[in-house]
Amino acid sequence: MTGAPAMEASLAAVADAGIDIRHALFDRFFAAYPERRASFMVVDASSRRMTDETLQMMFGLAKGDGWVWPLVTELVHTHRAYGPLPIAEYDAFIDMTVAELGAAAGAAWTSECAAAWTGQAEALKAMIRRARAEWQAALPDPATAV
Ligand code: HEM
């Protein structure tokens, strides 16, 4: 449960402020990786799900929820269909998600809160690496490699 109450407070603060962080997040992501924009057919739909699920995975990790690992494996497998996605882009998307949440959270973004999100961001990045390695070992065909 480390950090989970502070993380929940920041999510509530952003919701109370009526801020939908996906807009600034995806603007920032596409500014950093403009060549990736063409991979998205329906940004409005995908930006909702990518943002929500990234936040939920980090919050779930903070609570020790067991569903996070199977969802991460599914996410990594689904994303194989979008072409080879460098691990650096996953890392950047997760870091940008935390940064945009922090920018929107106002006074709820305490040092404890920031540390909790940053710690779970690192845990999620590690889990994505593990899932990619396991899929690579199970499905080693280079044409479908992650
Ligand atoms: C923790 C990180 C991420 C999560 C949780 C996540 C989650 C999702 C989800 C739930 C969808 C929608 C799938 C569907 O509706 O069938 C999606 C779509 C997609 N994601 Fe991610 N994603 C993440 C990172 C990334 C990164 C880093 C990239 C690119 C470098 C990326 C590229 C895409 C693309 C291209 C689509 C399909 C968009 C479309 O067809 O409009 N995702 N993602």
Image (cartoon, rainbow, N blue to C red):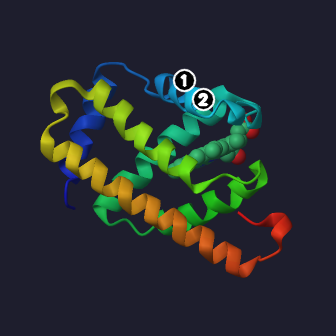
Q: Give yes or no for contact between labels 2 and 1 (Cβ–Cβ under 8 Å).
A: yes
Tell which of 13 and 128 is nearer to you.
128
Q: Which residue is mark 2?
A: 30
Disc 2 and disc 1: Cα gap in Å?
5 Å
Quadrant containing the N terminus is bottom left
**Dot 2 beta carbon under 8 Å from ligand 1:** no
> Across the whole image, how many numbered discs are drawn on residues?
2
Residue 24, x across and y down, in percent: 47, 23
**113 to 76, vertically: above or below:** above
**33 to 119, vertically: above or below:** above
Which residue is painted at 51% across and 27% down in the image? Answer: 28
Residue 136 placement, left or right of 67: right
Q: Where, by quadrant of the figure, is residue 38 drawn? A: top right
Q: Which residue is mark 1?
A: 27
- Displayed-image quarter of ligand 1: top right
**Dot 1 beta carbon under 8 Å from ligand 1:** no
Q: Residues within 10 Å of mark 2 (few under 14, many from 20)?
A: few
| Residue occupying the far top of the picture | 18
SS label for mark 2: helix
Q: Where, by quadrant of the figure, is residue 13 drawn? A: top left
SS label for mark 1: helix
Residue 19 placement, left or right of 89: left
Tell which of 7 and 132 is nearer to you.
132
Quadrant containing the C terminus is bottom right
Which residue is painted at 21% across and 24% down in the image? Answer: 106
Residue 55, x across and y down, in percent: 42, 45
Residue 84, x across and y down, in percent: 73, 54
**What amino acid type is highlighted by mark number 1?**
Asp
Tell which of 138 and 61 is nearer to you.
138
**What amino acid type is highlighted by mark number 2?**
Phe
Residue 112, x across and y down, in percent: 14, 46
